[in-house]
Amino acid sequence: MNFSIGDKVITRKNHPCGGNEWLVVRTGADVRLKCLKCGSFVMMDALKLEKRVKTLISAEADK
């Protein structure tokens, strides 16, 4: 799965704030995500994130 900056990710489990929608802010071996509900940032290994993703919404699809 390829992640790009600006993509939205919906995870299987919720963040402690209750949100499950994330914005991809940085990519590479580690991916930095921003919670769209509370605004907190999380850094996660790309392989770990692939297992936790339920849906990937491309930034190009939103336009």
Image (cartoon, rainbow, N blue to C red):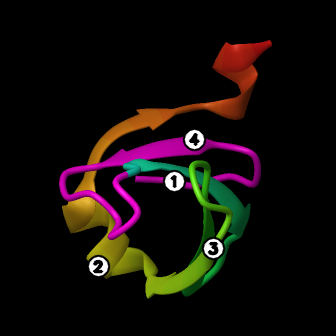
Does the residue at mark 4 contact the one at mark 1 (Cβ under 8 Å)? Answer: no
Q: Residue 40, how many percent across, how many down? A: 63, 73
Q: Earlier in the sequence, mark 4 or mark 2?
A: 4
The residue wearing badge 3 is 40
Classify residue 42 by image quadrant: bottom right
Q: Earlier in the sequence, mark 4 or mark 3?
A: 4
Q: Identify residue type, mark 1.
A: Asn
Whole-number angstrom distance, CA of label 2 to CA of label 3: 19 Å
Q: Is residue 3 above or below residue 34?
A: above
Mark 4 against mark 1, which lies toward the viewer? 4
Q: Is residue 5 above or below residue 46?
A: above
Packing grade of label 1 (10 A; few <14, some 14-19, many >=20) is: few
**What is the number of the mark on residue 8?**
4
Packing grade of label 4 (10 A; few <14, some 14-19, many >=20) is: many
**What is the number of the mark on residue 48?**
2
Left or right, 54 with respect to 7, comes to: left
Does the residue at mark 4 contact the one at mark 3 (Cβ under 8 Å)? Answer: no
The part of the chain drawn in magenta is: 1-18
Mark 2 against mark 1, which lies toward the viewer? 2
Q: Identify residue type, mark 2.
A: Lys
Left or right, 22 with respect to 25, comes to: left
Does the magenta stretch mainly form a helix, a strand or a loop? Answer: loop
Q: Identify residue type, mark 3.
A: Ser
Packing grade of label 2 (10 A; few <14, some 14-19, many >=20) is: few
Does the residue at mark 2 contact the one at mark 3 (Cβ under 8 Å)? Answer: no
Whole-number angstrom distance, CA of label 3 to CA of label 1: 22 Å
Q: Residue at x 41, y 50 (%)?
A: 19
Whole-number angstrom distance, CA of label 4 to CA of label 2: 16 Å
